[in-house]
Image: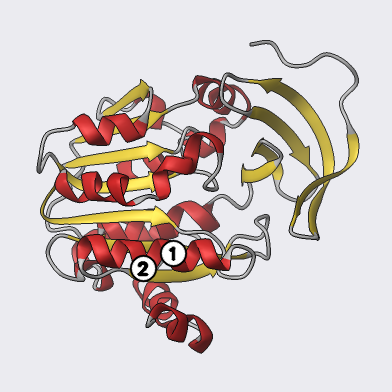
Amino acid sequence: MAPSSGRPTEGWIDEIHDGVRYGLAGRVIAETQSPFQRVTIIESERYGKGLLLDGCWMTAERQERHYHEPLVHPALCGAERIERVLVIGGGDGGTARECLRHGGVRHLDLVEIDGQVVAWSQQHLPAIGEGCWSDPRFHLTVGDGIAWAAQAAEASYDVVIVDGSDPAGPAEGLFNRAFFAHCRRILRPGGVFATQSESPEAFRQVHLDTVKLLREVFGHADPLYGWVPMYPSGWWSWTFAATGGRRYLEPDPARAAAVVGGCEIWSPRWQRGAFEAVPVAIERALAH
């Protein structure tokens, strides 16, 4: 699709949620309506070029590592094996890029429902995906990730990562029991599941419900807390589960050493603190 015509919007670009405004100074450089959502590319003063979906912040060049590194490395450093990886969502390429930094990954399937997100990420945000698009281990499918998980063979992946947007529109089905059960089914023994699990401040009930549901499906699940500056409240979470115990809590030393030098946020030390940083109010809520 062609971007909308007219003079780029300059000034403040805002995401408004629950009576709170989150904004960046910048301008809209491309915008279109895909079959699934409104896709917007912005140029911000502080974080460079970024992506919004239906008016919600998704990623930006100079802060995306705050999101992608915590989502990927606890899973890739914790799974028993990492030869086969499935990423559902993640059309900007950042999650795939971080996964492919692990030399043990032999095959990565990325299933993104919106081809417009992929096309514009490649065109406008090439620094986020970097070389993932041309990596021979990378395999892109533009299609429904929920259907992919339902149809995939049992025990066919070592790691499953869900890099979806908020639970509305095309991403709504990424937060329910049936989908999580399929993700567990397609994991190999010793496999790890990871998902973004919303802000414990701006979307607290969704966050709590996600963690509780994963605990019911997998028998255990642990949220990890960090910060993504452009997201509502700035405080974000990722939740991990596994088919072989809570193995994501302890990174494999060799795998961690191979990637930590290229990280800006994640390290084994940071990960330990982020898993422990559970506010007592959330701890109480998760216990009931």
Residue underneath mark 1: 209
Rate crowding at label 2 as few (under 14), some (14 to 19) or many (20 or more) other CA atoms within 10 Å: some
Q: Is residue 59 above or below residue 191?
A: above
Residue underneath mark 2: 212
Q: Give the x, y percent position of residue 26.
A: 83, 41
**Residue 174 appears in the picture as rendered:** yes
Q: Nearer the viewer, residue 96 or 222?
A: 222
| Residue type for callout 1 | Asp
Image quadrant holding the N terminus, namely top right
Numbered-mark total = 2
| Residue shown at 41% from the left, 50% from the top | 175
Q: Quadrant of residue 242?
A: bottom left
Q: Is residue 253 above or below residue 18?
A: below
| Residue shown at 32% from the left, 28% from the top | 135
Image quadrant holding the C terminus, namely bottom left
| Residue shown at 80% from the left, 60% from the top | 19
Q: Give the x, y percent position of residue 4.
A: 78, 16
Relative placement, left or right, of 244 versus 204 is left
Relative placement, left or right, of 37 versus 273 is right
> Which secondary structure, mark 1?
helix
| Residue type for callout 2 | Lys
Q: Quadrant of residue 230?
A: bottom right
